[in-house]
Amino acid sequence: MGDYIGRKWGIIASCAVFSLGVGLQLDTRWATFIVGRVIAGLGVGLVSCLIPMYQSECSPKHLRGAIVGLYQLAITIGALLAAIVLNATKSRPDHSSWRIPIAVQFVWAAILVIGMLVLPESPRFLLKKGREAAGKSALGRLLTRPVDSPEVTAEFDEIMAALEADRQLGSGSYADCFRNTDGKNGLRTWTGILLQGWQQLTGINFIFYYGTTFFKSAGIKNPFIITIICDVVNTATTIVGTQLIDRVGRRRLLLIGAAGMCICEFIVAIVGVTAGHIQPDHSVNLPAQRVLIAFVCIYIAFFATSWGPVVWVLTGELSPLNIRAKAMSLAVASNWLWNFGIGYATPYLVNPSTTGVLGVKTADLGVKVFFIWGSTCAGCFIFTYFFVPETKGLSLEQIDLLYRESSVLNSEKYRARILADNETFVQHVKGAAHENLEYTDEKAA
């Protein structure tokens, strides 16, 4: 959708799809409710692809991390508000107990639509479609400069130079996303897909989907309040995380976050199977409970300052313009696929050992599941070290240049060189053309 009707109008259309689904979910018939759930899910899938992409393409390079990180902040605020609304309506004796939480979603869709109506279309989408006048006008609005100003002209030339170089490598199809071209399309696409998968494998949604059940099984009283505390921690530390992305850097934050989460989850697992284990007389160790809660909250803080917002930032900026929408759709599909898989598998991993649906025997891991999440966080660290470059402070076109001219492990040095020399894609193209001309002259001589 983003490549056909645009980022802006794609978001607006996605909100309409989502709102239709929300409306159908208010029906008391299960069949209608399920259809509405599916349609609303389609809307969520669309906006989760289009919004970070729109933010990336419209943000100044020195603020892009913070701006795209706000997408994750909005998710955490939504989760917190949902928990509060659910707690407020759960004791109602009629249909309003579930209809109110669902109907509240209309408000956020309306706010998003109204906001998008006053914002410009992505200039990169417009230029990709050959609408140069409209693209320059959108650039002027975003840069707060006249259309014929040197700043707008320079940005226009930079985008067009990178786009032309991308088009020489392919037509921008889904197949092009996986081709190992000079621009390393395959590496960039797989990095986005796997980043979203690793984000889900940190185990974060175990806490937010099954936190209440987990805390209850660990012997903690009033687990629902603990879940709300986790939502508050998630929201507060995401605010911190959005401020760190453009200061600390994407790659470094992911490495720190993965290491911190790994340590916390192994501590939760070890305490849970030793001092925190519920005794045969159903008594519990109160200090161990507090350790469990504390380290779950610290784990959430590490996630919220790193893998929560940073993955969305990188997903929106790693791919070149010619394939960005398609590559990002694949990455976001990976997110939701792993989200579903983990959500489906978790009850079979942690519930008491009984025969479940279709005769499947559950594993009854309980708190031992944190050994799995700790191990996957170690995998997150290794993946980041070898496959995620540092892109802090670079424009989207300079990221194209980084992938063409450097490697992941040398990305920090090359990034520093680009920034020190203020190297642009246009300068790179001119330099390459000059070298080719000199080589031709030498051969002729």
Image: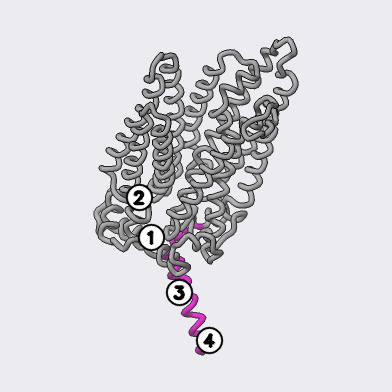
As drawn, the label of residue 358 is none
Q: Magenta segment range?
A: 418-445
Residue 48 image offset from top left, x and y in percent: 43, 43
The residue that disc 3 covers is 433
The kind of residue on which mark 2 rests is: Arg
For marks 4 and 2, give the one nearer the viewer: 2
Q: Earlier in the sequence, mark 4 or mark 2?
A: 2
Measure how far apart labels 4 and 3 are at the Cα level.
Answer: 15 Å
Residue 324 image offset from top left, x and y in percent: 44, 55
The kind of residue on which mark 1 rests is: Ile
Question: In the image, 235: left or right of 60?
Answer: right
State how the image is colored: one colour
Q: Foreground: 362 or 245?
A: 362
As drawn, the label of residue 159 is 1
Q: Which of marks 4 and 1 is nearer the N terminus?
A: 1
The residue that disc 2 covers is 7
Neighbours of disc 1 within 10 Å: few (<14), some (14-19), many (20+): many
Neighbours of disc 4 within 10 Å: few (<14), some (14-19), many (20+): few
Q: In which quarter of the image is residue 259?
A: top right
